Amino acid sequence: MKQVSNSLLTLLTIPFRKLPCALAPRERASADGRHLTPFFAFPETACKCGVVLRDLSCPPRNLVRSRLGEGRIRNLFHGMLLLFLVIYFISGLIPETAAAESLVINLKEEAIVVSDKVLLKHVADLKGPDRDQIEKLAQIFLCSAPAFGETVFLNRRQIGERIEAMVGHLPLDNFSGSAAVLIRLKGRPITADEIASLLKSHLVETTSWNESEITVHSIGSINGMELPPANGSLRISSDASIAGQRRILAPIEILHEGKRLRSLWITAEIAIRCEVWTAAKQIRSGKIVSEDDISPRVVEITDLRASYVRFPEDVLGKASRRNIPAGNPLTCESFTDPLLVKNGETVRLRLEREGIVLTSFVKAEQDGKLGQTIRVRNIDFSTRLNAEVTGKAEVQVQ
């Protein structure tokens, strides 16, 4: 029995019919020796013509149906393997080909430099396949850094000219990002501890508080503040005073080599706790303060603008300008020197010349405190004189 052309039988696409060349034996043949079979049985002596694929024992009926020939599974596997290899090599070559032409100089909008030289790496992000080229480009000198507090602009044309002078011409397609770069020199950030120390020193110099009595809880409005990288310092403006109560507003000046660069305002929360003199009992307006009226106590200061009484001599013998409840801290602004001479009052006039002392009575024409000079009139002669108040109802001719 002859073996058919494929272990997988090749079916006809037409209904069964008599085929004279179907030589495969059948047990039940027709009377004329012809067989009804749905298969082609090609003899070995058949003429081999047309397109023959490798591993096929006989040519296929047509090229469209060549996949149905012998070894089609093996052919399909080989074809798929070849296709995968082609795709792999193409995918590997495309990135390398694109990378060879993908040098990118992406310019920044702002460049902050820390040295006195501005290099290309400071103003742009460099990307490309050639590392040596990238490193060489990164070190290209563009310009000197501006002075602290000043800025300088570089546009694409200027940057391109500097690159061309060093490594040759680069197409504009290699540039991306901003059209121009703002360049400034980076300074040293200002810390809250620096501001706190500055405020304490200023309060010690301008008030009666000691440094140990001052606590700075927080500092605000210092984000982004910078000092020059060298020879920079801070100070509080000499022509301004710290205003506020617990939360204050203070003017700060940034100096470079002793010269003022700029001024700004900062906020701070300050607490002061110290011993001051308070009212031991109610002190009425106009009352002359005595030792029984005051007593010391440790309190927290709520108003930094006020000058609190730190020593009893600051208020003893002075007159109160307003009613002060018991327990309230005393401020120097609440007291004044009492009037020792009142307008229209008759006072004693004292005149001293070369060891000779003369006294008489005059009429005061002004109110006067201790040490003030007022006008007086002689009672007998109606002569006006200027005299200094030296005590209660007493003046002296200068």
Image (cartoon, rainbow, N blue to C red):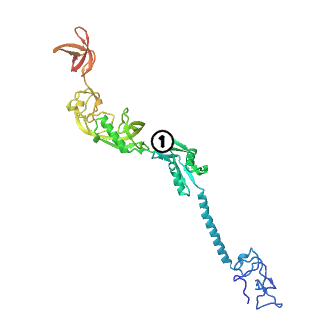
Horizontal relation, residue 121 to residue 56: left or right: left
Q: Alpha-carbon neighbours of circle 1 within 10 Å: few (<14), some, or many (≥20)?
A: some
User: Residue 158 placed where, x, y %?
Assistant: 56, 44
Q: Is residue 381 above or below residue 167?
A: above
Q: Give the residue at mark 1.
A: 146
Q: Report how many numbered discs are placed on residues in the image.
A: 1
Nearest the eye: 270 or 224: 224
Q: Residue at x 58, y 45 (%)?
A: 157
Residue at disc 1, secondary structure: loop
Residue furthest to the right: 32
How far across and how far down the image is residue 47, in percent? 78, 82
Image quadrant in which the C terminus is located = top left
Closer to the camera, 201 or 288?
201
Whether residue 178 is visible here, answered yes or no, is no
- Taking the image as shown, residue 354 lies to the left or right of residue 309, namely left
Q: Is residue 308 left or right of residue 195?
A: left
Q: Residue 340: x and y, percent?
A: 23, 21
In front of the other: 179 or 237: 179
Q: Quadrant of the N terminus?
A: bottom right
Q: Amino acid at mark 1?
A: Pro
Q: Which residue of the protein is positioned furthest toward the top in this rendering?
A: 381
- List x then y, in percent, for residue 250: 38, 37
Query: Does residue 266 lie above or below 66 as drawn?
Result: above
